Image: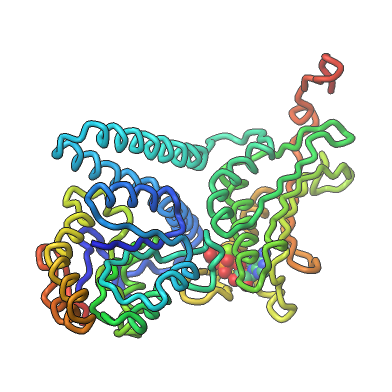
Amino acid sequence: MKVVVIDDEESLTERLRRSLTRKEHEVEVFYSLKDAREGLEGTEEPMVVLLDHDFGGAGEQDQKGYDLCGWLRETHPFGLLLPIIYLTGRELPDRFLQQQRRDPFVHPTAYLSKDQLASEQDLLPNLLKRYEGQFERIRELFEKQSAQQALIAFRDMEPEDFDTYEVE
Amino acid sequence: MFMIYEKVKYLEGDECLPISQNAEQWKELATLFEDVIHELNQPVANIGIDASDAIYCLDKGDVEGLRESLDSLRLAVQDLGERIGAYKALTQRSRSEETIRVRDIVDDVEKVLRRRADKAKVKLDIQLSDDNQFNRVLSVKGDPFLFRMAIRNLVHNAIEASNDPSIPPDRRHVIIRGIHSPSEDSQTFPHGSVLIYVRDEGPGIPPKIRKRIFERGFTTKQGGRGLGLGLSLVQSVAESCGGKVGMRDVNPGAEFWLQFPAARHRENHERRYDNEGGRYRR
Ligand SMILES: Nc1ncnc2c1ncn2[C@@H]1O[C@H](COP(=O)(O)OP(=O)(O)OP(=O)(O)O)[C@@H](O)[C@H]1O
Ligand SMILES: [Mg+2]
């Protein structure tokens, strides 16, 4: 499964790269929103995106991960169904909820606060595993047929095992 | 769509803490917590990835991978330890009035704000004239907690101002300067004073709002990023220590200054070892 990691913190991206590669994912890392835009321009292939919120470290104070999220939703053929896992730092969830209400078509698929990466439930690996379960089929559809076909298969991928809540 | 947030409980609008007469303490705590969360999130995330990776390797019987992830885990824990160390000083609140070296205070502030500054690509430049012509170590008397808080708020504001998207990289530096001013005649500063300047080359402060910046609750920061308590806190610290605070225009940017009574002569004239001459001097 292809996992795209977009974060300006190298200590984190290197660790993610190592552990995800070990699980035989294909990992691609971008350190800034600009690089990600350039690197992902025109991409149609299925992927899971891990996206950070704050890119001040990359000199991008005027943009947030959110902006890239909107761009991906617009440009990638999977649109709203592209799995984007948003890694949040010190921001509180209510801020994201507000944003989500304002911009219902831009939001990430899941929010994961960075401190939750250390949780016993292994949230990130489990989330990825869940996507992976269907990923092969999607990839095949994508390669043999079209992004549209693969998109339909993506709809079945709805993680239920987590303690989650709906946003009205 | 779903969100993963098992353990985070968040406050609804009316549950939020009111800004009461304790606003200043509350604000200090809030900034401190925010700083702490900001600092600790990263190593905690790294530890999480490494630990989960180690367990994965163990299950697979991959000894080499296990060693690699444990080595990485150790580095992440070291990093966490260092970051926590920077906060230790902040928790030490003295009971008595003590003579404090300005350098120690500024170093503590630098430690807690360094990463924030790095993130904003802002350079912190510290210039303390400990070797001034009077051979006086810059020192003040009082509660180090309060001094730290005041200086930290000024430096914090300066970093935020420099981090404005309109500010180019070559203007992203903050200068923290400390000097001793000898005038001993005045009533307010019988032993002279210590002046601390915090200067940035950010957008500066528009004349229209200059009168109001020290007001409690005045902020230009949108979206709840500022409570407008920083400068009012600095002012009350300055007053409670018998000092003063002010700002002046610099072009480009802003410069805030704090003036505190210097510690008394005797205490102030710590005997210092003169490296060059190899003897003690006053
Ligand atoms: N170095 C500076 N450069 C430009 N403007 C400044 C600077 N320091 C303070 N200000 C202005 O003064 C206002 C009040 O500052 P103050 O520190 O009291 O509150 P704040 O920074 O907005 O919020 P808080 O400190 O409570 O997080 C700021 O909103 C900003 O407009
Ligand atoms: Mg402030």
Q: Is residue B226 above or below residue B260?
A: below
> What is the x, y in percent for residue B138?
75, 37
| Total tally of numbered discs in the picture | 0
> What is the x, y in percent for residue B141?
68, 38
Is B199 left or right of A109, judged from the image as shown? right
Is A52 left or right of A167, judged from the image as shown? right
Q: Is residue B239 above or below residue B138?
A: below
- Here the colouring is rainbow
Q: Nearer the viewer, residue A25 or B228?
A: A25
> What is the x, y in percent for residue B56?
19, 43
Q: Residue at x 45, y 51 (%)?
A: A10
Picture quarter with the C terminus of chain B: top right
Q: Residue at x 45, y 66 (%)?
A: B20
Q: Residue furthest top?
A: B279
Q: Nearer the viewer, residue B70 or B97?
A: B70
Is A12 left or right of B228, judged from the image as shown? left
Q: Residue at x 45, y 64 (%)?
A: A54
Question: Would residue B7 be seen by someone viewing this image from the given angle?
Answer: yes
Q: Nearer the viewer, residue B124 or B152?
A: B124
Q: Nearer the viewer, residue A157 or B86?
A: A157
Q: Residue at x 36, y 72 (%)?
A: A95
Is B153 left or right of B185, judged from the image as shown? left
Residue A114, image quadrant: bottom left
Q: Is residue A117 above or below residue B168?
A: above
> What is the x, y in percent for residue A145?
18, 80
Residue B236, image quadrant: bottom right
Question: Would residue B214 be seen by someone viewing this image from the given angle?
Answer: no
The quadrant where ligand 1 appears is bottom right
Picture quarter with the N terminus of chain B: bottom left
